[in-house]
Image (cartoon, rainbow, N blue to C red):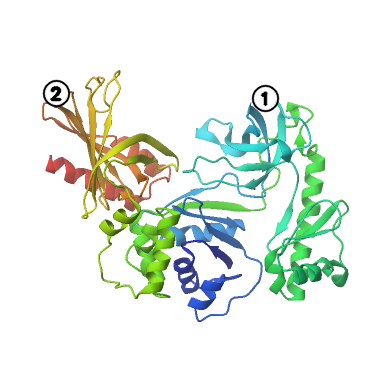
Amino acid sequence: MNVRVRGIYATALTRTLLDAGHEVVDASPPIRRRFDAEFETAPPDVRIATTDDRQGVGAHGDPDAVASLRDLLTDAGLDAMAWGDPTPPGTVLDGTVTETLGGGAVVELRVGGDEGGSGDAASAEGYLPYGAVDDRVETGDPVRVRVRESAAPWTDRRPELGGSLRAGGGLVALEPGSGTRVDVRNDEAARELAGMLDLLGLEPPEGWRAVWKAPAVDAETEELRAGLDRAVAAAEGLDDAVDAAGGVGVLDGPDLVREEPLATPHAGVWVWFGRESRFSLDDRRREATATMPGHHRVKAGSADASAGVDLAEALCEPDPDAAFPFGVVTDAFGPAEGDALRLEHGKPDGRLITLGEATVTAVDADGSVTVEREMTGGGTYDGLDVPREAGDVAETSLKEGRWWYPTTYRGRDGTVRGTYVNVCTPVEVFPGAARYVDLHVDVVKRPDGAVERLDDDELREAEAAGDVPEPLAEKARSVASALENAF
């Protein structure tokens, strides 16, 4: 299949894709320099792009191709986890406005399927800017929208929606309007593409206009013709389906709302890379170009850290056998003693829960970071059955790369109120947050010394649901057993 790759994982994934027999198309200049291979400008079957937070990638495109690539992407490491995208770009689906905000509306989308075996269609939330739809939008309005841009499940963004149609992609797309639009910065190339429809002797369907994309600049005439033919066929089919269903935008009544998407031209999957996966991707990248130990781990931390990696690799030849320089990285980018550090608690279903901010009290070059939080009163500590009192202090000991971390709760007088140990994917301590995915099973030690293992049933359920792959679930159980014995 043809795959387009962008972002900080592009070199490693290009190596992986080529080794698996796939074609990488529309390659970026750095990729063209690093590989002894021919890269075509053909339309991609799948687009792979790094997420904005650099924690993983999204793959979107032909449903069969996306399904085939899912295993290839998660083979990066034991802690690579994948979730299907219920709202891939281009999907046309119905929903109901649940909230109006300053610049747009929150829409509960009907994404199809059976949620929890209830017999009801599953739902997801999206964001509809007011300027993206012609009509006034109010809470309770039924709407039909197109997904402009999706969002990874672990981010705090909602998919962005639009109230108009769009078909095709790759080299050329079609959208409602007249004339021709060219999304190319080169003026000469833009003028040439603007007249391409006349040259090819083709016309978009009535009421649609062609939008030429940047890859079209280097494409052959037959490729442009094929791309336009595909876009025209998609637009005609989409137009007919939407007209038959009652149009797009704000609908005339709730009886027009469909439980299933009206059009699903693409499928998508989101893949989160854990620490072990990032180091495995380092090895793949090293086959193509000089790569420092922890290349992807550092780049995932912040934009400044990512630029620092590029500078370091440009100035000197990295030693592939060197240890990951945790102390150097934290000295340069943080966290430092006194900083605030978020505890970003990933869930096996893809969601991210922030447990709050803690104050860094110690940082060691061996990868150890200690943080403290002062607790509010009320309730009890999960798993410990001990009252939570105002002024209690929670001390969490994080260590880069470890499959678990303990939190010890102490009263004002220093009395230990219990210790709770989370079993998780290997901890990563980034400049502003400690990041991992919780694997459900935990071990606690109560004030009287009693040790108990918790939530094995939740891990089994997550494994049965496909959220935690079997090898990862077995690793979690092994870690929990070792912690029980150590306690």
| Residue type highlighted by circle 2 | Asp
Say above or below: 484 vs 416.
below
Give the Cα separation between the discs numbered 2 and 1: 52 Å
The percent position of residue 214, horizontal first and vertical second, equals 69, 65
* Front in this rendered view, residue 132 or 58: 132
Q: Earlier in the sequence, mark 2 or mark 1?
A: 1
Q: In the rendered view, does 91 fall on the left or right side of 447?
A: right
- Residue beneath disc 2: 413
| Residue type highlighted by circle 1 | Thr
Q: In the rendered view, does 133 fall on the left or right side of 277?
A: right
Q: In the rendered view, does 266 fall on the left or right side of 35?
A: right
Q: Residue at x 72, y 57 (%)?
A: 168
Q: Which mark is residue 139?
A: 1
* Figure quadrant of residue 158: top right
Say above or below: 334 vs 356.
below
Q: Quadrant of the C terminus?
A: top left
Q: Name the residue furthest bottom.
A: 36
| Residue 77 seen | no
Q: Residue at x 54, y 60 (%)?
A: 48
Q: Which mark is residue 89?
A: none
Tell me the SS state at disc 2.
loop
